[in-house]
Image: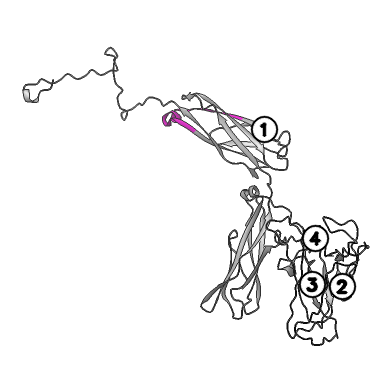
Amino acid sequence: MRLRVFPAPIRRRGQNRLGRWTAGGLGVLGLLAAGLGLPGQTAAAQPVGVPLVDETFTGADAIAGFEAFGPACLTGAPEAPAPGPGTHPLTGCPAGATGPVPPNDAAPHGYLRLTDASNDQSAAVLYNHALPANQGLVTTFDQWQYGGTTNPPADGISFFLIDGAASLTSPGAFGGSLGYAQKLPDDDPTPLTPGTEVPYEYVATNSGNTPLTNVNVTDDRVTGITCPKTTLAVGETMTCTGTYTVTAADATAGSVTNTATAHGRSGDTPVASPPDDVTLPVQSGPGVRLEKSADDTRVYRAGDEVTYTYTVTNTGSQELTGVSVTDDRVTGATCDVTTLAPAGQSGDSTTCTGTYRVTAADAGRGEVVNRAVATAENGTVRSNQDQARITVEKKPCEGKHCKPKPCHDKHDKKCKPKPKPKPCHGKSFCHA
């Protein structure tokens, strides 16, 4: 079973970003001996071990059978204008390439340069002749890559053959023939923000030779994935869907990665696909941070007024309006300003204040603990919850359930006299 997963509105990122080396994406398709045939050509059988193609690409030209797609060129040849779209002769490279790249006109120390070091390119070099394959083919080549900048690296290399009776007109989309999701120019996803719902599509294929039942997809982040059916015939494909909501923790991490696996049964035997993962960039969206404080160095009494201070800070990249503070004990907290500049700019925080009068019930508990949150943009942006604790002097106990206080003043009318000892008439039971 095979599974491919990608966000529905956005092509895969991370593993499909291939524009940082010689291939620049599909640039290495048919790097040395891409077996591309011309219609109507016939290929004579060759003895085992006889070289069919031998090209180093270090000189100013190459074997006439090679043709190029896209920006593929020879650095050993003199500089040449940039080629147009489609097939073209394999000639020199144009000036002004994104480097570092090998120098031009460098024969006999040249290279086959499929792309320069820029992103989002598609190129290929094809040997446009039919090759006999009745004894099999052995292909060897050397290749060099530009320094990768993705993590994990997404560079790769591909060699392919097609039917000798067919012809090829283009090298394909970025990444697809290297085993990655198809990628188109400028297809990089815009960074997500917390609260964004990301729809995912999971393409499950029965790549085995028996029908599958009980087919389903699991994802370590997405719950409630739905599939149109639970059975797959041999070679059949279906697309399942699910949705994930980006969290603040994802924004802190800078990205969100989810891993999915397709499951099923072949008869009584459970089968599963290799796990497939997608990484999407996440940036902090609108948000506020709240810090609450009070003078907790003193002991309060019933009737005392407590002043609370709330510092509200904009943690996002956009201006926030309608800033306010809600406290479960304080009413009418006011803020110096209610509009905050983007994070990092002057005016990105404000101070709010509120008061609370300690009650007799608080004195009975011996403390006051209250919690507050800050909101903005009509309550759509909400801060963390913060709390403050103050100590309250417990008031004396009153009522029949209270234990009497010790009495040390015989003149105090509230003091009960110590009961006189009863007369003792037996020595054995009398106490001193």
Circle 1 crowding by C-alpha within 10 Å: few under 14, some 14–19, many from 20? some
Of the 4 image quadrants, the one containing the C terminus is: top left
Q: Is residue 192 visible?
A: yes
Identify which amino acid the numbered label 1 is placed on. Thr
Identify which amino acid the numbered label 3 is placed on. Gly
Considering depth in this image, is 10 or 41 the residue closer to the camera? Answer: 41
Considering depth in this image, is 199 or 177 the residue closer to the camera? Answer: 177
Q: Is residue 426 visible?
A: no
Circle 4 crowding by C-alpha within 10 Å: few under 14, some 14–19, many from 20? many
| Label 3 or label 4, whichever comes before in sequence order | 3
Q: Mark 3 to mark 4: distance in Å?
A: 18 Å
Q: Mark 3 to mark 2: distance in Å?
A: 10 Å
Identify which amino acid the numbered label 4 is placed on. Asp
Q: Mark 2 to mark 4: distance in Å?
A: 21 Å
Tell me the element at label 2.
Answer: strand
| Label 3 or label 2, whichever comes before in sequence order | 3
Residue linked to disc 2 = 67
Q: How far from the left and from the top, in percent, is residue 415?
A: 28, 18
Identify which amino acid the numbered label 2 is placed on. Glu
Res 350 label: 1
Res 322 label: none
Circle 3 crowding by C-alpha within 10 Å: few under 14, some 14–19, many from 20? many
Of the 4 image quadrants, the one containing the N terminus is: bottom right
Circle 2 crowding by C-alpha within 10 Å: few under 14, some 14–19, many from 20? some
Considering depth in this image, is 216 or 103 the residue closer to the camera? Answer: 103
Q: Mark 1 to mark 2: distance in Å?
A: 66 Å
Considering depth in this image, is 263 or 301 the residue closer to the camera? Answer: 263
Residue linked to disc 3 = 30
Q: Residue at x 83, y 58 (%)?
A: 101
* Magenta span: 353-368
Q: Mark 1 to mark 3: distance in Å?
A: 62 Å
Residue linked to disc 4 = 120
